[in-house]
Amino acid sequence: MRGEFARGEVARITTQSGQLVARGISSYSSQDLANIAGKHSKDILSILGYDYGSEVIHRDDLVVIQE
């Protein structure tokens, strides 16, 4: 993960080489993601104190970029 963003902002999803793959509205901030990365989604509430769902970006809020 790179960059900083707030909950509700549009985030860019890229490959490791930096190629843009998709854009989507994030359910969590970059700071939240740093805290829950690698953890089970059932533990989000106990880690953060709130839970906006198990998806970082729901498919309804995702646009895949085809190049």
Image: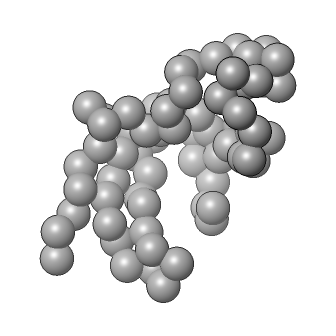
Residue 64 in view: yes
Of residues 32 and 55, which is closer to you in this image? 55
The number of numbered badges drawn on the structure is 0
Q: Residue at x 52, y 78 (%)?
A: 16
Q: Residue at x 69, y 21 (%)?
A: 42
The quadrant where residue 44 appears: top right
Q: Residue at x 58, y 47 (%)?
A: 5
* Residue at the farthest left position: 67
8 versus 12 height, above or below = above
54 versus 26 height, above or below = above
* Residue at the farthest bottom position: 17
Of residues 22 and 11, which is closer to you in this image? 22
Residue 7 in view: no
Give the quarter of the figure containing the C terminus.
bottom left
Residue 64 percent location from the top left of the image:
23, 56
Q: Residue at x 21, y 63 (%)?
A: 65
Residue 24 percent location from the top left of the image:
36, 45
Left or right: where 59 falls relative to 30: left
Left or right: where 7 falls relative to 40: left
